[in-house]
Image (cartoon, helix red, strand yellow):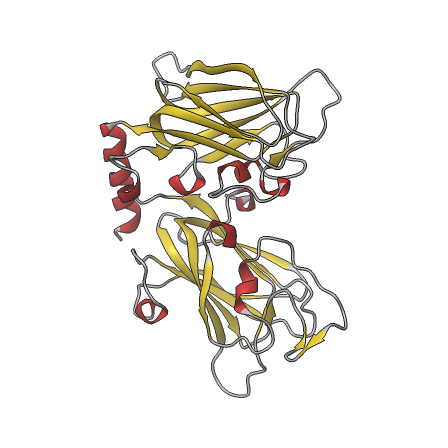
Amino acid sequence: MTDFTSLPDLALRTLGGAVIAASDESFAEKENLLNPWKPAFTPETFGPRGQIYDGWETARRRGPGHDWALVRLGLPGRIFGVVIDTAWFTGNFPPHASVEACFVDGHPSPAELADADWAEIVPKSPLRGDSAHAFAAAEPGRVFTHVRLNMFPDGGIARLRVHGYVVPNPAFLTSMTVDLAALENGGRVADCSNRFYSSPDNMLFPGPARTQAEGWETARRRDDGHDWALVHLGAPGVIRLAEIDTTNLKFNAPAEFALTGIDDRRPPDNRASSWRLIPRTPLQPDTRHRFRLSSPEVTSVRLDIYPDGGIARLRLFGDLSPDTEKDLVARWDEYTKH
């Protein structure tokens, strides 16, 4: 996959990612690595540790070894690529870096991860200052829960992005009602008409949107069309409750929406089946709208908004079929047993 940066950042702080340990953070805190915003910099702003950087910066090494940061991914998944960004670090960036990954279920401590089965997904590679470096991952066929960023020998890195597909643990999906569209359950936006202001994946993030920037917002349309997003569910299921949330969108919410369910498991005629689950319906600004329904078993939904605007969150609560649950367990075993 060449454009892996369009995939979710599995390490993002807003998805539950955390830097749980680092060899050193003398100049700038390790937690900055996973900040969701672009790295910022204000020159000649000095604190007790020196120039303030929106990134992770270690002391100058005077002996052997190298610095590292240990990251717990917010969501387990298959890693397709990594971005190591040295933005604003010009005279203090590391000349090389590498990335390792491992799978450890549960809630391991840094000490417990020391003996994990670590796989190198990005070999030791050269870095430039003030640059974003995109590296394809070496083992996209495995599920990982943690990554270790190594820099040689020391210096500053502004951001680490870990892009891939979420592979949910079936233990938290089977035998219960779940949000079939949630990113943490394997849902994802496969396509959309417009992502001018923000990514449509934001609609599937956990928790409420705190600002309108944390949802999906399109540009203003100047034609007769309308915007839409195609959402692949984490697994095929029957939708019981749909939630369309326009919270924080006070002057740019869509006027109306519609929701269509799709089963794209190919029948003999190679055509997907579709059902209008919710007809074209008015939306209110800054409001959480909830709709009871009972869909056929679907694999995807299409959310149409008229004519444009923003949606903070899309929730689709429902049930998995017994066959789907078996498939999820089999997939989890395939990706985690190596």
Q: Residue at x 33, y 72 (%)?
A: 111
Outermost residue on the top side: it is 269
For residue 9, side relative to residue 309 (left or right): left
For residue 10, side relative to residue 87 (left or right): left
Q: Residue at x 56, y 35 (%)?
A: 312
Give whichever of 89, 112 is nearer the camera: 112
Q: Is residue 317 above or below residue 79?
A: above
For residue 57, side relative to residue 42 (left or right): left
Q: Residue at x 38, y 40 (%)?
A: 185
Give whichever of 306, 2 is nearer the camera: 306
Q: Position of residue 220 (x, y in %)?
A: 72, 28
Outermost residue on the bottom side: it is 62
Report which quarter residue 297 is drawn in: top left
Give whichever of 6, 254 is nearer the camera: 254
Q: Is residue 250 above or below residue 146?
A: above
Q: Position of residue 253 (x, y in %)?
A: 64, 28
Q: Position of residue 67 (x, y in %)?
A: 50, 75
Q: Residue at x 56, y 78 (%)?
A: 26
